[in-house]
Image (cartoon, helix red, strand yellow):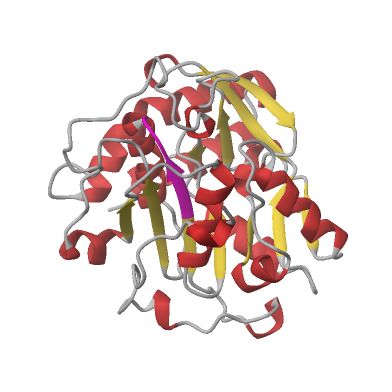
Amino acid sequence: MTNNEQRLPAGLLAGTTLARRPSGGNNAGCPAWPAVTCLCPTYGRVERLRDAVACFLLQDYRGEKAVLVVNDAPEPLAVPSAETTDATGLFVANASRRFLTLGHKRQALLESAPGGLVAHWDDDDLYLPGHLTQAVGALLDAPGATCAKARTAWWAVGPADRLDVRGIHANTFEGQMLFMRGRALDLGGYPPLDSGQAAALLRAFDKAGELHTWRPAPEDTSYVYRWADGADHVSARKGRSPRDADFGDGSPLIEGADPRAWAKDRLKLQFAAIINGARDTLGDTEALAAFGRRVLAPWREP
């Protein structure tokens, strides 16, 4: 079975402004803040997915944005109402059968996204409020680049209620890739692999000479790689039933009448732990204060 034989429902984003945006082949013709679609594959970890959705809701990005979640677990996720989607940018698709590999799932997401920019949005990691703004700015500031990725991330372990941030690490961290959708398809997209499919696409951008990487200062680092599952990542487990699977109870991913208030309430303890953990790296300095202001910006809204 090839990548193209497993697809998501056609027209998932039909009728939205994102779907009407031109694809663009490079960054020269992009609007100041082009539309971004965040691609989020998931399987059996609903509570961690809710954290990722909450991070999306708190992004300060000024352009249009959407997060597209595809779930192929045996229990379907609640599909948000049209009103919720309009208000939040959250789209959910439940696949009728298990994707053969995580690469198949990522490729289906890529093909279903509208033209323009797409960003990885992994369901078990955390994205601080300035993440999309920084990534898009880095891509647009790099002539000829079609993919951008920071080279460092905060490293955290443990569950949400005991998050332990262990400083800045340098790694591939494909979870913070942002790139031109059309160019990714030209390069072959994601190969049908359970492990290494994102790294393979990153190498394709690099080989084409179109990858821009940079090393942000610690206080500017906006991605938190959360190693809560160790090496036993649920999304790459094919059809097996993981011991720690969380399929949820079918309730909406976003709870309550005010999505941003829900997101802030959900993430406040984890974001506070991130700031506290950053103290070991930054010390009690102005850099730590600046980092704290960025992380907590949504809570200072009038």
Residue 208 among magenta residues: no
Nearer-the-camera pick, 8 or 257: 8
Classified by dominant secondary structure, the portion drawn in magenta counts as: strand
Residue 163, percent from left and from top: 47, 18
Residue 109, percent from left and from top: 48, 58
Tell me: residue 274, above or below residue 6.
Answer: above
Is 247 placed left or right of 143 in the picture? Answer: left
Q: Residue at x 23, y 49 (%)?
A: 259
Q: Quadrant of residue 119?
A: bottom right
Residue 123, percent from left and from top: 45, 39
Q: Residue at x 28, y 59 (%)?
A: 88
The total of numbered circles placed on residues is: 0
Tell me: residue 4, above or below residue 200.
Answer: below
Residue 95, percent from left and from top: 35, 50
Q: Residue at x 32, y 56 (%)?
A: 90
Tell me: residue 230, above or below residue 265.
Answer: above
Q: Which residues are magenta?
A: 39-44
